[in-house]
Amino acid sequence: MSILKSFFKDTAIYGLAIVLPRLINFLLVRLHTDVLPNESYSENTEFYVVAAFFNVVLTYGMETSFFRFFSKNKDKGKVLSTAMISIITTTLIFGVLLFVFKTPIVEALHINPEFYSFLVGITLIDTLVVIPFAYLRVTGKSIKFASIKLINVLVFVLLNILLLSSSFGSDKLQSLVSVSHKVEYIFIANFVASAIVLVLVFPYFFKTKFTFDSSIFKSLLRYGWPIMIAGLAFVINENLDKWLLPQLKGEFINGAYSACYKLAVFMTLFIQAFRMGAEPFFFSHSDKENARETYAIILKYFTIVGALGLMIVVVYIDILRPIFIKKETYLVALDIVPIVLLANLCLGIYHNLSIWYKLTDRTRFGMYISIVGAIITIGFNLIFIPKIGFMACAYATLLAYALMMLISYAIGKRYYPVPYDLRRISFYLLTSTVLSFITYYYFDRNIWLGTVFLLLFLLLIIVLERKELKTILHKTNH
């Protein structure tokens, strides 16, 4: 159980590194929705959809490949150096190509050409820092990692407040930084924050002697390219709705949908924090005794926490919502929140289950599964957005992630069987879903009844898991 203690400690630190900055960043939703009309907020969302696509292409699975081979290769310096040289070289090449082919890219992706330079600049910088950040994670420098992440978001938030909030004299700053669209101030803040991070991680570019090992590079590439394809499919699953919706239903609706989608951030933050701690842990402990039993326990408690998170957000949505979104024009899409929360919980379970293809070097299966999800996302959105509007986007996300979760479990049983407690996991997932959806849709968000449901669910967890929890807590304290 000391292994579990190590896992929870790392996850807590990385959780702080991811959750706290993103939670602070999430507070900007209120500022952005107050200051920007729906249409401008939609443009902001589309900007980051394209940035996510560029980021996956430019990193081409190198981060996960680096984790895999740095952990198992004796010559860690060569792995670090090869990965670093690879990312730097391809980033520079891609940067040139992105500017050379600006016009066709802008037209194909429906980007405002005035935002393009910011888009490319931010993407290139964020790609360059991928390996230094991965190095900090894989070598256990979680405090340094968390500190730099926190500095990044504090700079970004501070600049947003200074440039957009009239309470802090933004008029004077706006006269110094002239832009055609107010939304550009968000991109300027992002660029400055990313540039500061690049400066802070710059010493890590020289942590080892620069040597390029072609055999290591081929191994990294062979392992990583299916992850890149899976990443592209993931970007489609996560973001295609926010790219299609403005074209099919207009920027106003997309602005509302994108803002309400953000209310699922609590589940997203939990999943991201978990992944930051879990991915290095899964690789480094794969050869330990009872590793599979450990993975099974982790998934069960991940599901429990996620199920509780789902219910808490749904039950108290009318308390949480005004904190982040006040303007009524954005609330037309509020009904997507329970569906998107559940979809992200399914995604989190999928990420847990995905260890089987990462640990057995069968990353192509991750690619195949993600492609299935992407096909569902594309087809469902194209068919149903014209018929039922933005709700189709939420349903498509849930359908894609739920199916990916089930497929991964079914295939994983063959190649890397893990003794998951399927009965308990299914029970917690289904119970929290039913209670949440009844509270929100049938009883019209009745907070008192929802609280009763939440307490009953929590009591069920305590009754069913009390013995195991006592054992875990006892052994982790010794």
Image (cartoon, helix red, strand yellow):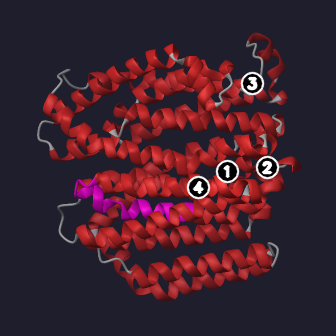
Relative to residue 188, is residue 408 drawn left or right?
A: left
- Looking at the picture, which amino acid does disc 1 mark? Lys
Looking at the picture, how far across and down is residue 176, in whole percent?
Answer: 75, 10
Q: Which residue is mark 4?
A: 379
Relative to residue 417, is residue 9 drawn left or right?
A: right
**Numbered-mark total:** 4
Distance between mark 1 and mark 3 Cα atoms:
22 Å
Looking at the picture, how far across and down is residue 22, in whole percent?
Answer: 58, 44
Is any part of residue 478 visible from this angle? no
Which is more N-terminal, label 3 or label 2?
3
In the displayed orientation, state which residue is furthest to the right.
328
User: Pointer 1 and pointer 3: residues touching (CB < 8 Å)?
Assistant: no
User: Pointer 2 and pointer 1: residues touching (CB < 8 Å)?
Assistant: yes
Q: Which residue is mark 2?
A: 325
Tell me the quadrant of the picture where the C terminus can be found.
bottom left
Residue 465 falls in image quadrant: bottom left
User: Pointer 2 and pointer 3: residues touching (CB < 8 Å)?
Assistant: no
- The numbered disc on residue 262 is 1
Q: Residue at x 19, y 39 (%)?
A: 219
58 in magenta? no
Distance between mark 2 and mark 1 Cα atoms:
10 Å
Q: Which residues are magenta?
A: 343-362
Residue 75 falls in image quadrant: top left
Picture layout, residue 114 above or below residue 149: above
